[in-house]
Amino acid sequence: MALHSETGGIHLSISKELLSEMYRKMLRIRKFEKTASVFFAEGKIPGFVHLYIGEEAIAVGTCANLRDDDFITSTHRGHGHIVAKGGNLKYMMAELFGKETGYCKGKGGSMHIADAELGILGANGIVGAGHLIATGSAWSAQYRGTDQVSVCFFGDASTNQSTFHEAMNLASLWKLPVIFVCENNLYGISVSQARHQNIKDISQRAVGYGMPALSADGNDVLTVYEKVGQAVSRARAGEGPTLLEFKTYRQHGHFEGDSGAYRPKEEVEAWLQKDPLPRFESHLLESSILTEEELEAVRREVDEEIREALEFADASPYPAPESSVQDIYSDLIEEARIR
Amino acid sequence: MRKITYGEGIREALREKMLENKDVVLLGEDVGPYGGTFGVTKGLWEQFGEERVRDTPISEGVIVGASVGAAATGLRPVAELMFIDFLTFGMDGLVNQAAKMRYMFGGKISVPLVLRLPAGGGISAGAQHSGSLEAWVTHVPGLKVVYPSNAADAWGLMLTAIDDDNPVVYIESKVLYSQKSEVPDKVSKVPFGSAAIAREGADVSIITYGKQVHDALKAAAALAKDGIEAEVIDLRSLYPLDKETIFRSVAKTHRALVVTEEVKRGGYGGELSALVSEQCFDELDAPVVRIGALDSPVPYSQVLESLVLPSVEDIVKGVKEMF
């Protein structure tokens, strides 16, 4: 089925199956996050939880271009990336609950989910750390002679870290197959972009590294899909890295419990009108790609997946005490000082 | 047996592993045609080519961080920073990423990375090029830390480091690079967590590593003239630590002196001292003595530098005060 991309002006050929899968993944993220929000408020999920609600189009539009053996690095706001790359909701929910069956055996939590088999090199609690890791995984793919690509997801504020500049420079110099995907949600915690950098478009920064770049609408999944697709083709062909900036907005605060009072009400409302999910739904309906019944069927299936994930997480045991000092090394167990 | 330098020992281990395994790659500032700031990688670029011996920008963050990403996805990178002091710029990659990844990810991702860090003073290089920062890295669960004192150990520990599936911090003593010592015809791997007895003695255990092993041996020779036989333990591996060898020695000598080049405040020497005090209290005839640098940045002037860093005389004096 041929589709017209809303902003790109390029005719994309995307199958109904892929569009339907993209919708399902966006919904999975949205519902997973809504559920996490509720269970965090109830005290079932401890620690920090940073939700991705409102930014789903970027993770899904990006990962729809990737294979299982491609790599991604994620951020502290990582659930959406993990789901989009194919992460298992049960293991994710169990990890958030701090259970033994979680992706990281309950030792990582929301900010540290990884799945080597899906090329997920970890969500990351350090702002800007992923830039360097993705550069390294891209170097590894280049050296090993595979055509794997690495996608580095990061926020606007992380581009002020030295890691961003070091990674951009090396990736460009060595022509590494890495795609830097900036999710510009306009805030670094409470500090608006206008107060943390003197530029409007982060894509401008690529000029200094001789790297192609663009800024685009991050709430339109098809635009994201198209732009990332072009960058992935470049990377697989050995033509080097690309910086893509997608403008978006997080609908919740920086973390659960943050009211987001630093954001003007009108701004929040304007962005809610651009919510990527209803936008994609309308597009699918108006273009007669999916019927309302088909959409509803997907919603029910995703609800069921979430229910199963919750049930799995809730029924799973907490980790055994001795596991607290396991998995530090591949071959040593730290001297247990369990009291 | 033949004699080679400490620097050659490291290089031969790199060469041996690179010949054996194409996943072993080198990167760092000037490691290519230039052969490394201290000449350790000389000839490897010519032998293995640009793809495997990669000069990087002066950009320690990306040297360490990219090594983490590469190690997590199938390579076995050996990264060199010019001086251990520059680890400040690479600390996140080492401490928050490399060291914690396996644990945070439930054992799912390995980071077989070796980070080479030339350390120590003695060459008038000033405070930003003379650090002894082993306490920074031995403090971090998830890292292994080794510090050879001679060519054979430098070679054998590097073979083990490259084969290890965990991040290994390989600290090199700058003043030992050109020092020659004997190596066997076929150098074997030195297992981590195995200390060597550099000199046997019955009266006091001197626990040390790196350049200070040589100072301790000189001190032991001086002490022997006064009838004190010192046993010198070369730890070789700071983590994992060979506690058994330390405990056995202290049980024999009943006295322990720890020598490190780092400042004493908050140092690894304090850890060794506390360990012996806690675990060998009943064996000790005197409190454990710590010898280290003064709590000062390392000064430039040779006169001041030799004053700040621990000397052979400091060790001799420290031992004598225990009797």
Image (cartoon, coloured by chain):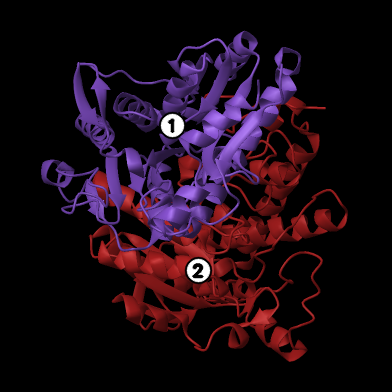
Question: A191 or A28, which is in the foreground?
Answer: A191
Q: Say which mark, if any, is on residue A267.
A: none
> Can residue B29 be seen?
yes
Question: B37 or A44, which is in the foreground?
Answer: B37
**Residue that label 2 marks:** A289
Task: Look at 59% across and 19% down and name the residue there.
Answer: B243
Q: Furthest-front residue in view?
A: B226
Question: B141 or B155, which is in the foreground?
Answer: B155
Q: For the residue marked with disc 2, what is the amino acid?
A: Ile
Q: For the residue marked with disc 1, what is the amino acid?
A: Asp
Q: Say which mark, if any, is on residue B215.
A: 1
In 3D space, how far apart are the residues under numbered discs 1 and 2 (Cα atoms)?
A: 79 Å
Q: Quadrant of the C terminus of chain A?
A: top right
Question: Where, by quadrant of the figure, is residue A125 drawn?
Answer: bottom right
Pinpoint residue A163: horizontal percent, then vertical percent.
46, 65
* Residue neighbourhood size for the residue with mark 2, other residues' Cα within 10 Å, grouped as few (<14), some (14–19), many (≥20): some
